[in-house]
Image (cartoon, helix red, strand yellow):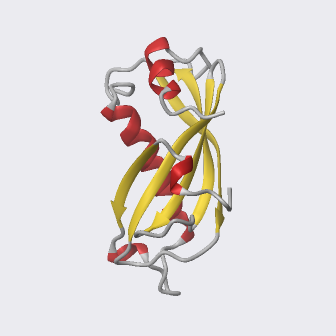
């Protein structure tokens, strides 16, 4: 995904970096990139009614994630998180994400994030609910 551009992603979330995101090397610390991924995915789901943190009996748990870093992001940059669904399985979904710094067209970082849908009480995998699947399909790419 090193060559990912903004045109490759059907959904975006803009996130302002914070002073505290910078580390001793004066760029956003690597662990913060994962928080951008998590925020973008969950904001997408909540905004489209596919996630109710308090009422849903079936929830997505992160089982895998990864990130490759290409260039630095630093406060006070704005991060534009591109989001798409790469694979929509029976009980899991694999998201692909890219972080774009300010108005840059090349990704500063790219990664993936996998949710497995589970019954909240048993923590056992279950099929992705139809309503959630329909929302995820809106950003699925081949």
The residue located at (59%, 14%) in the rendering is 127
Q: Give x and y (percent) for residue 140.
A: 56, 32
Position of residue 58 in the picture relative to residue 113 (left or right): left
Q: 12 above or below 102? A: above
Q: Closer to the camera, 118 or 38?
A: 38
Q: 64 above or below 130? A: below
The residue located at (50%, 27%) in the rendering is 136
The residue located at (38%, 51%) in the rendering is 13
Q: 31 above or below 75? A: above
Quadrant into which the C terminus falls:
top right
Q: 135 above or below 39? A: above
The residue located at (43%, 15%) in the rendering is 131
Residue closest to the far front: 7
Q: Give x and y (percent) for residue 123.
A: 57, 23
Quadrant into which the N terminus falls:
bottom right
In which quadrant of the rendered view does residue 71 lie? bottom right
Q: Closer to the camera, 107 or 25?
A: 107
Position of residue 142 in the picture relative to residue 97 (left or right): right
Please count the marks in the image. Answer: 0
Quick check: can you spot residue 120?
no
Q: Give x and y (percent) for residue 43.
A: 36, 41
Q: Give x and y (percent) for residue 90.
A: 65, 18
């Amino acid at each position: 995904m090193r060559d990912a551009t903004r045109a490759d992603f059907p959904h975006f979330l803009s996130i302002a970096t914070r002073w505290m995101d910078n580390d001793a090397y004066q760029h956003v610390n690597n662990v913060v990139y994962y928080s951008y991924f998590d925020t973008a995915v969950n904001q997408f789901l909540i905004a489209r009614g596919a996630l109710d943190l308090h009422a849903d009996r079936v929830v997505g748990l992160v089982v895998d994630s990864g990130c490759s870093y290409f260039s630095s992001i630093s406060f006070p940059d704005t991060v534009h998180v591109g989001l798409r669904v790469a694979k929509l399985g029976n009980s899991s979904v694999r998201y692909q994400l890219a972080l774009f710094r300010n108005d840059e067209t090349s990704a500063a970082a790219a990664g993936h994030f996998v949710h497995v849908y589970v019954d909240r009480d048993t923590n056992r995998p279950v099929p992705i609910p139809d309503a959630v699947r329909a929302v995820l399909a809106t950003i699925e790419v081949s």
